[in-house]
Amino acid sequence: MKFGSWAGGVSIRSSKDSRVLRIAYRDTDKKLVLPIVEEITVAYQDYSDLQRKDNLENGLQYTQQQLG
């Protein structure tokens, strides 16, 4: 399913006091809601994992340079 066909039904909010994202999706076809939210969740988790890995690698590189 192409992003443009369902993107209008997505609502994503973040809280000021936490790192929690609230993801909602509305559609007239109930069968689409859960699979689309799950796809968004998996994509965000993959992105978050990459960011965390990059931050760890950057921290390790900085530490090695300081010790070096």
Image (spheres, rainbow, N blue to C red):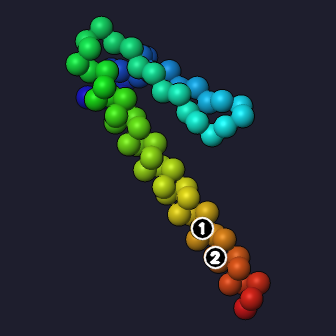
Q: Quadrant of residue 20?
A: top right
Mark 2 neighbour density, 10 Å: few (under 14) some (14–19) many (20 or more): few
Q: Residue at x 34, y 36 (%)?
A: 39
The residue carrying mark 1 is: 56
Label 1, secondary structure: give it.
helix
Residue 50 at x, y = what percent? 49, 57
Q: Is 66 placed left or right of 46 in the picture?
A: right
Q: Where is residue 1 shown, x and y percent of the image?
A: 26, 28
In x, y percent, where is residue 25? 41, 19
The residue that disc 2 covers is: 60
Which of the 4 image quadrants contains residue 28? top left
Q: Name the image quarter holding the C terminus.
A: bottom right
- At label 2, the amino acid type is Leu
Q: Residue at x 23, y 19 (%)?
A: 31
Amino acid under disc 1: Leu
Please give the name of the residue rendered at 62% of the width and 30% of the height, measured from the top-left corner: 14
